């Protein structure tokens, strides 16, 4: 086995991790921005209500509408973050499944390696993956 073929899975995983890191950073930035805008809109709505003496005015209505919009945008950002987390969990599960199926999982320190299992077929691997995701 050449060094390149041995390193290939590690390089692919490293590239996936770098891609996930960039995605995570943009999702966290979007979530942070949406949260700050939501809090600012809440403060503006409270201030508009206070300035109007508790009366409904065009300014209070506009501030409340902006607050509702910022709330929805914050919820969307939260949903995207949750979807990202779920996709990472699925990817990790899939990689673990592939490692187990192909026998490329390594033994933990202090444990003897399990006897090598023959790799399973791609069809069987797909069936196992579908069963794991259900």
Image (spheres, rainbow, N blue to C red):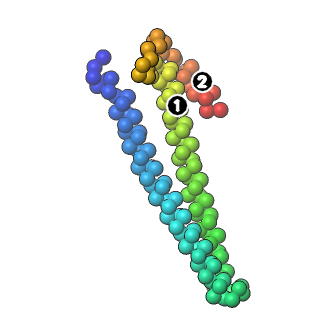
Can the viewer see residue 62 in this picture? Answer: no
Mark 1 neighbour class, 10 Å CA radius: few under 14, some 14 to 19, many 20 or more: some
Q: How many marks?
A: 2
At horizontal 62% and vertical 64% (from top left) the residue drawn is: 72
Q: From this viewpoint, which residue is outermost toward the left?
A: 3
Residue picked out by circle 1: 94
Percent of width and height locating residue 103: 46, 18
Say whether residue 105 is left or right of residue 83: left
Percent of width and height locating residue 87: 54, 42
Can the viewer see residue 5 in this picture? Answer: yes
Q: Earlier in the sequence, mark 2 or mark 1?
A: 1
Q: From this viewpoint, which residue is outermost toward the front?
A: 110
**Tag 1, which secondary structure?**
helix
Nearest to viewer (mark 2 / mark 1): 1
At horizontal 61% and vertical 59% (from top left) the residue drawn is: 75
At horizontal 49% and vertical 25% (from top left) the residue drawn is: 98
Determine whether 65 is above or below 84 in the image. Answer: below
Residue picked out by circle 2: 127
Snapshot quadrant of residue 43: bottom right
């Amino acid at each position: 086995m050449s060094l390149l073929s041995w390193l290939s899975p590690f390089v692919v995983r490293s590239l996936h991790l770098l891609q996930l890191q960039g995605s995570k950073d943009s999702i966290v930035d979007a979530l942070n921005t949406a949260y700050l805008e939501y809090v600012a809109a809440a403060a503006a709505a409270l201030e508009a209500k206070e300035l109007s003496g508790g009366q409904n005015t065009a300014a209070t209505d506009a501030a409340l509408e902006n607050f509702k919009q910022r709330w929805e945008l914050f919820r969307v950002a939260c949903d995207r973050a949750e979807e990202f987390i779920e996709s990472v969990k699925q990817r990790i599960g899939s990689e673990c499944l592939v490692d187990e199926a192909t026998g490329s999982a390594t033994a933990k320190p202090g444990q003897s390696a399990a006897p090598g299992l023959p790799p399973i077929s791609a069809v069987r691997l797909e069936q196992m993956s579908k069963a794991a995701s259900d």
